[in-house]
Amino acid sequence: MNRSRTKAPAGVNLPALRHHNAALVLDLLRAAGAEGISRLELAEGTGLTPQAVSKITARLREDGLAAGA
């Protein structure tokens, strides 16, 4: 019996995924401008969970890329 082997899908590159998600959030923050945008709106706009958005915005604030409300 000759079974063809298919390559398993590659694993997720977590640093790249974090970078991608942070970029999504940062893009929406920039688009909102001085008006601002809530974390809930960020979650809805990115498809991320509110918890993920909170973690990402905290990191962006620590890095000086976002201001707190």
Image: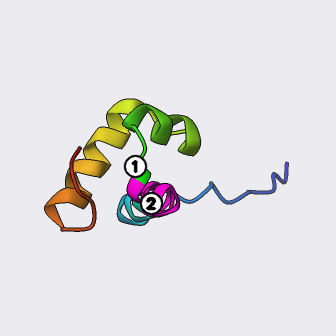
Q: Is residue 13 visible?
A: no
Image: magenta residue range: 23-34
Q: Nearer the viewer, residue 26 or 11?
A: 26
Rendered image quadrant of residue 22: bottom left
Binning the other alpha carbons within 10 Å of mark 2 as few (below 14), some (14 to 19) or many (20 upward) gives few
Q: Residue furthest right?
A: 1
Residue pointed to by mark 1: 36
Q: Secondary structure at mark 2?
A: helix
Secondary element at image label 1: loop
Which residue is denoted by mark 2 in the rendering?
33
Residue 3 x/y as whole percent: 81, 51
Say left or right for 62 vs 37. Answer: left
The verdict on residue 15 being magenta is: no
- Examine the rendering and report whether any part of residue 39 can be seen: yes
Q: Residues within 10 Å of mark 1 (few under 14, many from 20)?
A: some
* Horizontal side of residue 45 vs 53, given as left or right: right
Please report contact status of discs 1 and 2: CB closer than 8 Å, yes or no: yes
Return the residue found at the far front. Answer: 35
Quadrant of the frame with the C terminus: top left
Question: The disc labelled 1 sits on which kind of residue?
Answer: Gly
Work out whether residue 52 or residue 32 is closer to the camera in this orientation and state it. 32
Secondary structure, magenta segment, majority class:
helix
